[in-house]
Image (cartoon, rainbow, N blue to C red):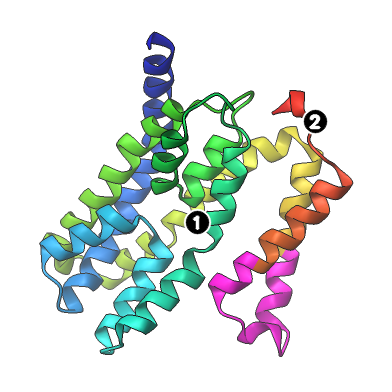
């Protein structure tokens, strides 16, 4: 129990930068949610139960245009399907003796940033470490949404544009340090960036939705990397 508490505290500490980044980025979501006709409470509930920036922003556009529930559900399925892959990857790092319910609750808080931080930890992943990240990151995302919905209309447009890129800057800050230590990881990141550019400019590939694009690139690049440079069991 003491070990679990220590891991939880470590997760809270490491999750503070994620929470601060989420607080800034979700500010813009709160503003857009209010403009889409949602109440402050509705916007907060969306952020609390979804915890997905791309999915939530896409949902707002569908809600604003009067889209159907089917369109909303399908868009969320496609955009957020990558989290299934991330959860499957993290499950390989969790101690095999850990009860199933830990994997169940950890899956709720899997985001790009929490996944990157959890996956970069050395040795087996403690569920309590992920819980610690979730304990600060999810309230940060929800609180930012509330603040944006309440006071966001007072901010100038250029400030809102700056907040829109904060999430990507935070993600770069998470993946760059591990990439400096691992040449294989650096190559994988560069390949992913190059492939993303090709998907964005080539005639047929650029028509693929962003969520599907992420899934294709994740599966393809991860499969090639796993085939060429598999991670030994002892190294996890």
Q: Horizontal placement of 203 versus 136: left or right?
A: right
Q: Horizontal placement of 203 versus 10: left or right?
A: right
Q: Is residue 148 visible?
A: no
Q: Secondary structure at mark 2?
A: loop
> Residue placed at 54% from the left, 71% from the top?
211
Residue that numbered label 1 is attached to: 168
Q: Is residue 194 visible?
A: yes
Q: Position of residue 71 (x, y in %)?
A: 38, 83
> Residue placed at 48% from the left, 64% from the top?
80
Q: Position of residue 190 (x, y in %)?
A: 75, 55
Q: Quadrant of residue 4?
A: top left
Quadrant housing the N terminus? top left
Q: Secondary structure at mark 1?
A: helix
- On screen, 93 above or below 67? above
Is 134 or 113 nearer to us in this picture? 134
Quadrant housing the C terminus? top right
Callout 2–callout 1 Cβ contact below 8 Å: no
Residue at the far right in the pictured view: 228
Q: Position of residue 128 (x, y in %)?
A: 42, 26
Please say whether residue 126 is one of the residues in the magenta stretch: no
Q: Looking at the image, is mark 2 or mark 1 earlier in the sequence?
A: 1
Please say whether residue 211 is one of the residues in the magenta stretch: yes
Question: Which of pointers 2 and 1 indicates the residue nearer the eye?
Answer: 2
Badge 1 local density, few (<14 within 10 Å), some, or many (20+)? few
Question: Distance of mark 2 from mark 1, alpha carbons?
Answer: 30 Å
Q: Quadrant of residue 94?
A: top right
Is 51 or 150 nearer to us in this picture? 51
What's drawn in magenta, residue-wise? 194-215
Badge 2 local density, few (<14 within 10 Å), some, or many (20+)? few
Residue that numbered label 2 is attached to: 232
């Amino acid at each position: 129990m003491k070990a679990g508490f220590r891991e939880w505290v470590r997760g809270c500490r490491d999750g503070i930068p994620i929470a601060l980044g989420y607080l800034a980025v979700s500010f813009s979501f709160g503003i857009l949610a209010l403009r889409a006709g949602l109440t402050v409470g509705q916007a907060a509930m969306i952020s609390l139960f979804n915890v997905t920036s791309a999915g939530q922003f896409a949902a707002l556009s569908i809600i604003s245009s009067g889209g159907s529930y089917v369109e909303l559900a399908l868009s969320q399925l496609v955009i957020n399907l990558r989290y299934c892959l991330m959860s499957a990857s993290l499950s390989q790092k969790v101690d095999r003796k850990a009860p199933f319910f830990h994997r169940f609750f950890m899956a709720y808080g899997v985001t790009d940033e929490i996944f990157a931080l959890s996956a970069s930890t050395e040795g087996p992943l403690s569920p309590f470490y992920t819980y610690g990240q979730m304990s600060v990151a999810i309230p940060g995302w929800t609180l930012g949404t509330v603040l944006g919905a309440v006071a966001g209309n007072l901010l100038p447009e250029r400030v809102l544009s700056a907040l829109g890129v904060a999430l990507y800057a935070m993600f770069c800050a998470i993946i760059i340090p591990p990439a400096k230590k691992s040449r294989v990881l650096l190559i994988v990141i560069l390949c992913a960036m190059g492939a993303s550019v090709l998907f964005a400019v080539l005639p047929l590939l650029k028509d693929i939705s962003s969520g599907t694009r992420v899934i294709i690139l994740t599966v393809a690049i991860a499969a090639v990397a796993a085939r060429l440079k598999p991670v030994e069991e002892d190294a996890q």
